[in-house]
Image (cartoon, coloured by chain):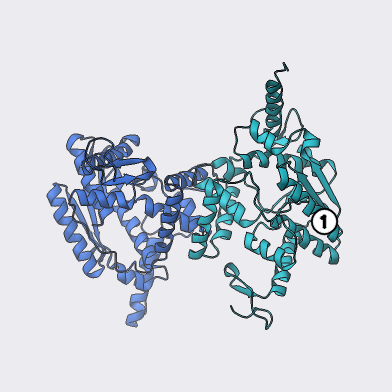
Chain colours: A blue, B cyan
């Protein structure tokens, strides 16, 4: 391993996309700098709700944002955790997030899915025909937006990383899944109060899983080590490993790929942003039906329950 | 290897994208059927000029079209070969194409680049700052359209295969080369007589290099075995091998990928088709300058020549 670009220490990481070798200390500075530049670029200020699952991405994000707020008070960060009711995995996740928020001195809001909406994720997966990760995605997106909007937050920050985003897009392109390509979110989307849509910021949009993991390790950030037990066998995993091959061919390819898709999208006229509210929950939906995917999911859970019990609804 | 899907012979090829195993005879029939369906779909009729380089793709195409014309006289096919002046490679290519056209009983037009425009490809590469394959592409596109248009052909048929097309697109996406993505041609483009643009048909658009090679081998079609000596080290080669990995993950991914890009393009409003003619050659150009890329290339060759000879132009 080479020397660090900025000091005499040995480098502990090499970032081929930037042709950069860094020691631990300078990597931490570089990482926080990347996060801060995203906040600067989109002029993020006011109250920001940080979605914190307990995984390495969101825990690294919460730590970096807390570091930034020590020297810069433009924005105030509050942690938000959803207990999804996924057995022991959710119990452990909540515990880790609670302890870490306390340690950082960051206010934490915990949303218990079973208490708030009456169902856990495993219960909703059972009543839905969609893959487990798709069900969980619908619920998390809906809850995050609703809570952030109703509690008056200006922005919602989430821990999406470039590996997740590029893999979802690659899979979509390789399966003619145009809907996913067209609705794919970018680094920032502004608030749309007229349709109760909170502003979104994804500070790790161009940071990799490896960079998030390394930042977490260097800062001894506790994370839930295991993968979600319900995501086993998700087809996305096989597409992720394609990026290992592609990045060997061209280290900037992942960043370029996402930017290409975003540029193509910008040049598209046909794609319509969601413009109407769900008839039931009165939150925005892109669905062509009256109800949003979340409300249809919850409805199907209610229906199934009564059917199982032999009751007439 | 399994049995052929359609008879008791052993299969000699497996096409994972179609979940199809075929013997040699049924593969030949399948291949010709694929080509014929493209002609049917786009209602190709009248006089068709077939660009024939001497490589496996275009030679397989010429053979298949000649087979189709034996039982179906909607369209009449004429072979066209450009002698690019690439040393021994071009001499061999012309010879192979001449012999094969004669054997098939297909009329052949040969265009000698040096005689017609005064320069060989190696001479033009020397005066251009572009990569060799880009220079050659500019020249071939211009000559093919001009000859097909001026000789009154209804369509130009070319031997592009899915590996070429998907590799060019993948490289473009992974390098933010939006121009290539936006101008990428599809299976068919109709004639535009108002701007002297001949109709184009690419019957092998969704057929792979392997399928073209196998069809050529089974029919003992002579092909120029070697790669063009000027294409060595072309950066495209490394992107091509990525498809081997990707196709292992999902055998339909290459077809889906191209269709996704075409769909994205359809939904785009900003991209403008070429609408003006070059001031010099009076053939269509997408260039924002008055002269097309071909005429600028030829101009730079003329300028360089006189400079080299110490003459004042």
Q: State the residue in front, B269 or A1.
A: A1
- Residue A147, can we see it? yes
Disc 1: CA contacts within 10 A as few (<14), some (14-19) or many (>=20): few
In the picture, the quarter occupied by the C terminus of chain B is top right
**Residue B274 percent across, percent down from the top left:** 68, 38
**Residue B222 percent across, percent down from the top left:** 75, 60
**Viewed as shown, does residue A289 lie left or right of A190?**
right
Q: State the residue in front, A204 or B51.
A: B51
**Viewed as shown, does residue A17 lie left or right of B157?**
left
Secondary structure under tag 1 reads helix
Q: Residue at x 68, y 31 (%)?
A: B297
Disc 1 target residue: B99
**Residue A53 percent across, percent down from the top left:** 25, 57
Q: Residue at x 53, y 41 (%)?
A: B177
**Residue B4 percent across, percent down from the top left:** 65, 78
Q: State the residue in front, B30 or A1.
A: A1
Which quarter of the picture shows residue A244? bottom left
Relative to B208, residue B229 above or below: above
In the picture, the quarter occupied by the N terminus of chain B is bottom right
Relative to A152, residue B220 above or below: below
Q: Residue at x 48, y 64 (%)?
A: B249
Relative to A161, residue A137 above or below: below
Q: Chain under label 1?
A: B
Extreme residue in the top direction: B312
């Amino acid at each position: 391993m080479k020397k660090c670009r900025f000091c005499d220490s040995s480098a502990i990481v090499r970032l081929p996309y930037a042709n950069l070798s860094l020691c631990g200390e300078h990597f931490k500075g570089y990482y926080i700098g990347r996060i801060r530049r995203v906040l600067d670029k989109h002029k993020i200020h006011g109250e920001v709700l940080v979605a914190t699952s307990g995984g390495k991405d969101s825990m690294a994000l919460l730590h970096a944002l807390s570091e930034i707020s020590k020297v810069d008070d433009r924005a105030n960060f509050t942690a938000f955790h959803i207990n999804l009711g996924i057995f022991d995995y959710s119990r452990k996740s909540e515990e880790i997030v609670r302890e870490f928020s306390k340690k950082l001195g960051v206010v934490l809001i915990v949303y218990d899915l079973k208490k708030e909406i009456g169902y856990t994720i495993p219960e909703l997966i059972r009543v839905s025909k969609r893959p487990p990760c798709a069900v969980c995605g619908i619920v998390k997106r809906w809850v995050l937006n609703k809570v952030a909007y109703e509690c008056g937050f200006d922005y919602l920050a989430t821990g999406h990383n470039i590996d997740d985003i590029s893999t979802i897009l690659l899979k979509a392109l390789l399966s003619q899944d145009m809907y996913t390509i067209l609705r794919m979110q970018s680094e920032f989307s502004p608030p749309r109060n007229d349709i109760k849509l909170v502003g979104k910021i994804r500070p790790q949009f161009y940071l990799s899983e490896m960079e998030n993991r390394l930042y977490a390790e260097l800062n001894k950030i506790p994370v839930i080590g295991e993968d979600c037990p319900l995501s086993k066998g998700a087809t996305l995993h096989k597409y992720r490993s394609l990026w290992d091959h592609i990045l060997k061919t061209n280290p900037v390819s992942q960043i370029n790929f996402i930017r290409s898709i975003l540029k193509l999208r910008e040049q598209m006229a046909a794609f319509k942003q969601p413009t109407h509210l769900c008839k039931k929950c009165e939150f925005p939906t892109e669905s062509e039906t009256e109800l949003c995917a979340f409300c249809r999911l919850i409805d199907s859970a209610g229906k199934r329950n009564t059917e199982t019990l032999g009751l007439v609804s």
